[in-house]
Image (tube, rainbow, N blue to C red):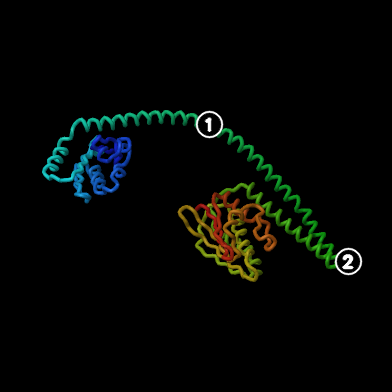
Amino acid sequence: MAAVEGAGHIVRYVNPAFCRLMDKPAEQLVGKLFCEILPERDDCVSLLDRVYRTGKPESHTEQEHSEPRPVFWSYTMWPVIAGERPVGVMIQVTETAKVHEQTVAMNEALMLGSVRQHELTEAAEALNAQLQEEISERKQAEEALHRAQARLSDHAGELEGLVTERTSELTATNQQLEAFVYSIAHDLRAPLRAMQGYSALLVEEGGAALGEAGKGYADRISKSAQFMDALLSDLLAFSRINQQRVELTSVNLETVVESVLSSLQKDIQEKNARMESSGPWPVVLAHEPTLSQVIFNLTSNALQFVGPGVPPLVRLRAEEQAEFIRVWVEDNGVGIAPDYQDQIFRLFTRLYGEKYQGTGIGLAIVQKGVERMGGRVGVESAPGQGSRFWFELRKA
């Protein structure tokens, strides 16, 4: 005899005869799944599933071919009912060298009709004891959980106050730093323009005395000043995006795209670029000046980062999603290796060094601008296969 519990058929009780039949002590059987004890008796396990599912008793006999004579296994199973539903199954397993059909039938009828009361009582008491133990453990666990939650709530309050204080300090520090960067960037542009002007005058008025080497030095000074001026200009733009008040309104994407392409018309003509702008262009929730800056930076990068002698091909399009509008800016440029695709949105990141003009700030402005409008930005690219930049903004 054996008793199993639950849909998983966990063995909860075995009598000594079952242990002898399995040739194992009770402690190696109780707690295991019944299918682990009889792994080669698929019909028996299927019968056990059916009895537990239907709540109706059943029996099954199968023959095992062995020498010197066959062995018969007989299973009789009936459900243990609690609360009008099966909670387990009692199993009688019989192994015999001969099958006496009438005896087996009588035994099945006897077992199915009148199970020994003390075995059912023992099984019920064991299940009840286990249930009481689990209830007690659960109450203890709930009490411990309540105490832990109370302590956690106290710690959370302390931590929240500390975070608020630190956040306030960090915000003030960031504001001071941004104001400092803005002031430095703004004030440095005046002497840079003077450097550019004086180097041009030097070449113009003293060109003959300077010679080719001197002109080259003056030209380097002028180009360095131009690069520094562009760098400071981008730093100012990045600082403005951080500091300016961003109020989101309904913005027509088509109007912004047309304005950006119009402002880039000179670069488009000089590079003999082909521009493709495909609608429809939905209305998004955005800050129009910031949105213009984002699309301008992405489009100008697409015009710039192409191979030598390759006419740029730039596609702008919008893709409608459940709650967002995704805007794509795609190009046929040099592409970006996967290892560097997270780095390109950081300040001063220049993947191609001196090969292409740029300050390494444009994409940082793009990411910061999109984040301030409540969106996100990303890129899909591979070296030599162009890049597909995208950003998402909420529908208006």
Report how far apart the C-alphas of labels 1 and 2 lie in the structure.
Answer: 76 Å
Instruction: Give left or right: position of 179 versus 88.
Output: right
Q: Quadrant of residue 292?
A: bottom right
The label on residue 155 is 1
Q: Is residue 202 among the parts visible in the rendering? A: yes
Q: Is residue 289 among the parts visible in the rendering? A: no
Q: Identify residue type, mark 1.
A: His
Q: Position of residue 5 (x, y in %)?
A: 28, 38
Q: Position of residue 103 (x, y in %)?
A: 12, 42
Q: Quadrant of residue 288?
A: bottom right
Foreground pick, 279 / 386: 386
Residue found at x 63% / y 48%? 242
Task: Give the label, 1 or 2, closer to the camera.
Answer: 1
Q: Are marks 1 and 2 in contact (CB under 8 Å)?
A: no
Question: Which quadrant holds the N terminus?
Answer: top left
For the view shown, which residue lies furthest in the right direction? 209
Instruction: Give left or right: position of 263 versus 68.
Output: right
| Residue beneath disc 2 | 209
Kindly state the secondary structure of the residue where label 2 is placed. Answer: helix
Q: Identify residue type, mark 2.
A: Ala
Q: Position of residue 286 (x, y in %)?
A: 55, 52
